[in-house]
Image: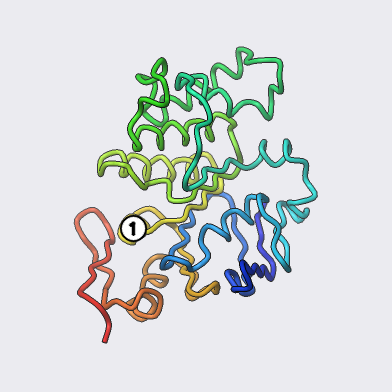
Amino acid sequence: MSLKARHLQVRLGGHPVLAGIDAAFQPGQVTAILGPNGAGKSTLLTALAGLSRPDTGEVTLDDAPILALSPRDRARRLGFIPQTPELAWAVDVETLVGLGRIPFTGARGLGAEDEVEVGLALQACDVAGLARRDVTTLSGGERARVLLARALAGDPAWLLADEPLAGLDPGHALDACDLFRRLAHDQGRGVILTLHDLSLAARMADRILVLAEGRILADGPPEEALAPTVLEAAYGVRARLVEGDSGLFVEVFGRAP
């Protein structure tokens, strides 16, 4: 099972956002997509999820064009968490997480198996204690964890998340990192995330793609993709990758000359 981008090009307002992206993703790995603002991270992720149509090129899932799959089939196989999700109405957390089962249940409502998946997702994201809370009363970090639970309730083979750690406090960010690694390493799912936190990416990811100006600047394990020359070219900073007590982290010295 693989998810592949082939020669992806996207232009928005006449400006190239993706300029010929080729990348293949495998299950069992956490892949972090990094890059400065405007590098094309979110655009690439939505294209991989089949939620947008590139100007040229295509995305394939198991060698089939992803846009040829029905929305329901895509939703059964890929879970997607947008960067700025909208909650259209006030419902309790358990009901919202249960919506992740719709690709399987349709309009018939949740059965016993669905209830089990919802319960597992609530526990995995540490939001079981919020099950009866109205989602509109939650903090930004709590909402982020609930939306992750909704995606996991669908038991997808692939999880794609746009800035899933934004708004999380340090403890829950580390918990989320551990969860993403378990989903990939223990359960064999493909996990693809966009991130801004370089140190969390170094800690969590098996593979890192660094985008700059719509192109892949680096693609490899953290120690290669976060090399000082790459970080200077992508972000314009002087930085280095350091081995700390808890793993790798990125130390930024300042702006590059």
Identify which residue, 104 or 130, lies in the foreground.
Answer: 130
Pointer 1 local density, CA inside 10 Å: few below 14, some 14–19, many at least 20? some
Q: Quadrant of residue 250?
A: bottom left
- Where 75 falls versus 61 (above or below)? above
Q: Position of residue 134 (x, y in %)?
A: 41, 20
- Where 177 falls versus 148 (above or below)? below
Q: Position of residue 155 (x, y in %)?
A: 58, 33
SS under mark 1 = loop
Task: Tell me how many marks there are.
Answer: 1
- Where 69 falls versus 115 (above or below)? below
Q: Relative to residue 95, is residue 244 drawn left or right?
A: left
Q: Position of residue 26 (x, y in %)?
A: 59, 55
Q: Residue at x 48, y 50 (%)?
A: 162
Q: Amino acid at mark 1?
A: Asp
- Which residue occupies the extreme bottom position in the image? 257
Q: Residue at x 36, y 47 (%)?
A: 166
